[in-house]
Each structure stands twice: as structure tokens, then as C-alpha cells.
Image (spheres, rainbow, N blue to C red):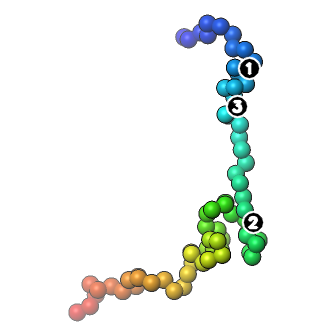
């Protein structure tokens, strides 16, 4: 079993523990919807990011819904 050779002084203990503090996550409040979300992330309730709708859009472009294998 490992045993410390010398007693740790209070300043060294404080320096070691200085990086162990818990920090509350940062939050942002949207001006339009008053919804709370993480900064620089998409608001998952409304789908807005920096005032633009990026999630939950109805005008999705692409090949969703078209199935070429069923033709013929």
C-alpha cells in the first residue's frame, strides 16, 4: 500500500483542488421565444439557431419519401 512520504501543505492541497470545482452550465435565453438553451447550440424546443429555423422545417429538400425500388 502506498504511503505518502511527507505531509501535504495547505497551499499545495489548494493548488491541486483548484481545478476540481463544479461549474453550473451556461444558459442563454432567446429574445423571441423566451426559451432557455445552451449558448451556440440549437434550441431543441423551437428548432431555432440565431433566429433561423434549422430544425422541424416543413420544406425539407431531398429524396425523403421517394422510393425508386417500388416503381415498375
Report the disc number at residue 11. Answer: 1
Vertical placement of 71 versus 56: above or below?
below
Q: Residue at x 69, y 20 (%)?
A: 12
* Image-quadrant location for residue 67: bottom left
Mark 3, Cα crowd under 10 Å, few <14 / some 14-19 / many 20+, is few
Vertical placement of 18 versus 5: above or below?
below
Mark 2, Cα crowd under 10 Å, few <14 / some 14-19 / many 20+, is few
Task: Estimate the spatial distance between the alpha carbons at disc 3 and disc 2, rounded to whole Å.
Answer: 30 Å
Question: In the rendered view, does 64 fall on the left or right side of 17?
Answer: left
Residue under numbered circle 3: 18
Q: Are marks 2 and 1 in contact (CB under 8 Å)?
A: no
Q: Residue at x 67, y 26 (%)?
A: 16
Mark 2 or mark 1: whose residue is earlier in sequence:
1
Mark 1, Cα crowd under 10 Å, few <14 / some 14-19 / many 20+, is few
Q: Is residue 44 in sight in this rendering?
A: no
How far across and how far down the image is residue 4, in percent? Answer: 61, 10
SS assignment at label 3:
loop
Residue at the far bottom: name it: 72
Mark 3 or mark 1: whose residue is earlier in sequence:
1
Report the disc number at residue 29. Answer: 2
Task: Estimate the spatial distance between the alpha carbons at disc 2 and disc 1, rounded to whole Å.
Answer: 39 Å
* Image-quadrant location for residue 32: bottom right
Vertical placement of 28 versus 15: above or below?
below
Q: Is residue 22 in sight in this rendering?
A: yes
Looking at the figure, which quarter contains the C terminus? bottom left
Residue at the far top: name it: 5
Vertical placement of 28 versus 64: above or below?
above
Amino acid at each position: 500500500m502506498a504511503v505518502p512520504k511527507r505531509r501535504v501543505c495547505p497551499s499545495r492541497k489548494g493548488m491541486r483542488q483548484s481545478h476540481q470545482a463544479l461549474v453550473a452550465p451556461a444558459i442563454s435565453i432567446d429574445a423571441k421565444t423566451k426559451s432557455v438553451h445552451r449558448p451556440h447550440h440549437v434550441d431543441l424546443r423551437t428548432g431555432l439557431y440565431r433566429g433561423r429555423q434549422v430544425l422541424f422545417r416543413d420544406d425539407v429538400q431531398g429524396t425523403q419519401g421517394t422510393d425508386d425500388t417500388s416503381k415498375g
